[in-house]
Image: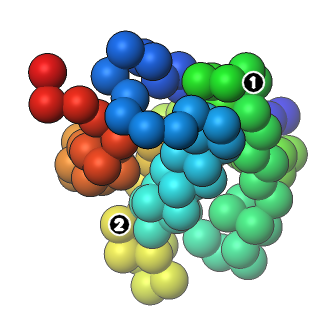
Amino acid sequence: MTVTVSAEVDGRCVVGKRDGLALALADGWRALCDPFVPMDTGRLAGDVAVEANGPLAAVIAYNAPYAARVYDGGSLHFHKDKHPLATAAWSDAAKLAGRLDALIRPYQTNT
């Protein structure tokens, strides 16, 4: 089962060229989330598709068959030897850690 993380960028808050922005932001977000993705063999973090879903929207899909179970977490306990920040709902954890703000700040206006 695939886990999909979707996002849209508010075009009114973007400075500069928009072509490819959603894809660039989604790929950047995938990279910033990576330390939070639980790792054993590396398949979960390695089997990811990033696709534009319009000029200001993108989708990040974690395609490992167990991705949804790991993302939901439940009572799973994640080893921290390979990814010390590993957790369920890794996109939410990365956002709480301030990674999203750091990613989008260069693209925002001062309004």
In the rendered image, the vertical position of residue 49 relative to residue 69, given as above or below: below
In the rendered image, the vertical position of residue 39 relative to residue 1, given as above or below: below
Image location of residue 61, percent across then percent down: 74, 40
Image quadrant where one finds the N terminus: top right
In the rendered image, the vertical position of residue 8 relative to residue 16, given as above or below: above
In-front residue for pair 58/3: 58
The answer to whether residue 69 is visible is no
In-front residue for pair 49/1: 49
Asked if labels 2 and 1 touch by Cβ distance under 8 angstroms, the answer is no
The answer to whether residue 42 is visible is yes
Q: Residues within 10 Å of mark 1 (few under 14, many from 20)?
A: some
Name the residue tied to disc 1.
53
The residue positioned farthest toward the front in the image shown: 16
Q: Residue at x 80, y 48 (%)?
A: 49
Element on which disc 2 rests: loop
Image quadrant where one finds the C terminus: top left
Q: Is residue 30 left or right of residue 63?
A: left
Q: Residue at x 44, y 85 (%)?
A: 81
Q: Residues within 10 Å of mark 2 (few under 14, many from 20)?
A: some
Image location of residue 105, percent across then percent down: 26, 45
In the rendered image, the vertical position of residue 44 relative to residue 92, given as above or below: below
Element on which disc 1 rests: loop
Amino acid type indicated by mark 1:
Asn
* Viewer-nearest of discs 1 and 2: 1
For the residues labelled 1 and 2, the Cα–Cα distance comes to: 29 Å
Q: Quadrant of residue 72?
A: top right
The residue positioned farthest toward the left in the image shown: 111
Query: In the drawing, what numbered circle is on residue 3?
Result: none
Name the residue tied to disc 2.
85
